[in-house]
Image (cartoon, grey):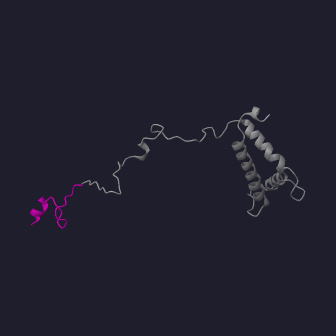
Amino acid sequence: MAANMATASTVIGLSSSSLSPKRTCLSSGFVKPIAVGNPLRQARVSGGRFTCNFQRDWLRRDLNVIGFGLIGWLAPSSIPAIDGKSLTGLFFESIGTELAHFPSPPALTSQFWLWLVTWHLGLFITLTFGQIGFKGRTEDYF
């Protein structure tokens, strides 16, 4: 009995199905057969290459952006608008206060963290808008 089962090419219980995989193509009036392949290799209008309108020089290496962005943030953040003090002044004052007890870090309840995050967030937003709006050519603006 064991010899008969070892030589059989079909699986018992599945009648005549064999262990070798068969590919069947199903088709109907609603479904068209498509060639399945790598979607990255399908022919495109650009000859198979992906095209994109993203500018490769989005991070402009123009120092005018950094310079004008820094001035554009330092000027308004230096206006004394918070109890007669400026945001830059409060931030630098908190740095001095925290450096007074240097080896120990600032406490989580220290005002230093508020001024740090606020000042740098404003600088980041200003520099980001500078990257977006500044064309990198000063002759367009002057």
Q: Main secondary structure of the magenta part?
A: loop
Residue in the picture at 28% in, 54% down = 25
Q: Is residue 73 above or below residue 60?
A: below
**Is 16 positioned to the left or the right of 55 in the image?**
left
Q: Position of residue 89 (x, y in %)?
A: 85, 52
Is residue 122 within the magenta segment? no
Is residue 14 within the magenta segment? yes
**Could you say which quadrant of the image residue 2 lies in?**
bottom left
Q: Quadrant of the C terminus?
A: top right
In front: 132, or 53? 53
What is the number of callouts on the image? Answer: 0
In front: 32, or 132? 32
Residue placed furthest toward the front: 29
**Is 112 positioned to the left or the right of 1 in the image?**
right
Q: Position of residue 40 (x, y in %)?
A: 44, 44
Q: Which residues are magenta?
A: 1-21
Q: Position of residue 58 (x, y in %)?
A: 64, 40
Residue placed furthest toward the right: 84
Q: Position of residue 98 (x, y in %)?
A: 79, 56
**Could you say which quadrant of the image residue 81 lies in?**
bottom right
**Is 42 positioned to the left or the right of 14 in the image?**
right
Q: Quadrant of the N terminus?
A: bottom left
In front: 98, or 31? 31
Residue in the picture at 74% in, 51% down = 120
**Could you say which quadrant of the image residue 62 lies in?**
top right
